[in-house]
Image (cartoon, helix red, strand yellow):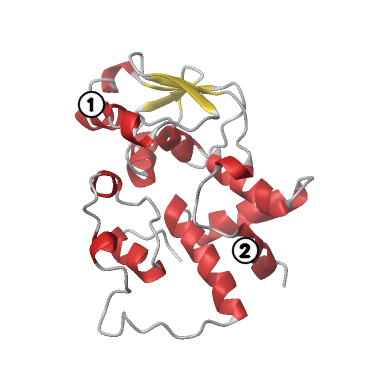
């Protein structure tokens, strides 16, 4: 399945939770999910019983849509998490959270992960002083992520940084708002990552 590029609020309504896919509208309280918490379509208000497999698949889909990851990338990330020591579910969340596009989002340089991915692919982001246009690149502890000099006055980036006072910055990054750079000071603990996803169900799905 290719990466989804359609209406994002429709996806949030389908799952009934905010996936932070519509940044400024969510912050302003104007998201359609706030007005219509039921699913889209003619039968959107019907909520049938979901099977165990359906629940597991639902969690995987939520994670994919939330982070903007394709099926192939998500599967590869899961198997990498499974190879590592420790809890597979926690490893999965840590690997996804340290993707370059997500780190740019967590540092407040973009209001959505979709825009953060666009910044990376268009060459607006530097890692340790070098331009890197691979959104799936896993940022390592201590690495410096910054907006390149020519892009520091980008109105959308400036606006996103201004909104960080309302939404806050992830505790595992340290940023300089004026110079528009940040450092991944440590890897996030699962308890710090507030997302509406039960990774246990994803592990169960792939473990069958």
Between disc 1 and disc 2, the foreground one is 2
Say which residue appears at 56% left-offset and 73% top-offset: 55
Q: Is residue 176 above or below residue 206?
A: above
Please report whichever mark, 1 or 2, sits nearer to the chain's N-terminal start: 1
Task: Give 80 or 131, whichever is nearer the viewer.
Answer: 80
Say which residue appears at 78% left-offset and 46% top-offset: 86
Q: Secondary structure at mark 2?
A: helix
Task: Give 1 or 176, whichever is nearer the viewer.
Answer: 176
Is residue 134 visible in the rendered image? The answer is: no
What residue is shown with label 1? Answer: 154
Q: Secondary structure at mark 1?
A: loop
Provide residue 166's location: percent of width, then percent of height: 32, 34
What residue is shown with label 2? Answer: 202
Say which residue appears at 23% left-offset and 26% top-offset: 154
Is residue 49 visible in the rendered image? The answer is: yes
Q: Is residue 44 left or right of residue 100?
A: left
């Amino acid at each position: 399945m290719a990466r989804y590029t359609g209406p994002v609020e429709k996806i949030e309504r389908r799952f009934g939770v905010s996936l932070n896919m519509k940044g400024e509208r969510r912050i302003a309280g104007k998201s359609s999910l706030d007005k219509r918490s039921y699913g889209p379509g003619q039968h959107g208000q019907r909520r049938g019983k979901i099977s165990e497999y359906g629940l597991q698949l639902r969690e995987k889909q939520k994670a994919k849509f939330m982070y903007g990851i394709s099926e192939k990338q998500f599967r590869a990330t899961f198997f990498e998490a499974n190879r590592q020591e420790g809890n597979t579910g926690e490893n999965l969340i840590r690997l996804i959270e340290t993707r370059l596009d997500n780190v740019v989002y967590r540092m407040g340089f973009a209001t959505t992960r979709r825009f953060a991915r666009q910044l990376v692919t268009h060459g607006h982001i530097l890692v340790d002083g070098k331009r890197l246009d691979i959104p799936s690149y896993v940022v390592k502890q201590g690495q410096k992520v910054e907006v390149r000099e020519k892009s520091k006055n980008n109105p959308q980036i400036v606006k996103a940084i201004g909104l960080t006072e309302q939404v806050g910055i992830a505790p595992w990054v340290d940023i300089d708002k004026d110079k528009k750079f940040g450092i991944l000071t440590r890897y996030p603990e699962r308890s710090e990552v507030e997302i509406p996803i039960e990774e246990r169900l994803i592990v169960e799905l792939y473990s069958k």
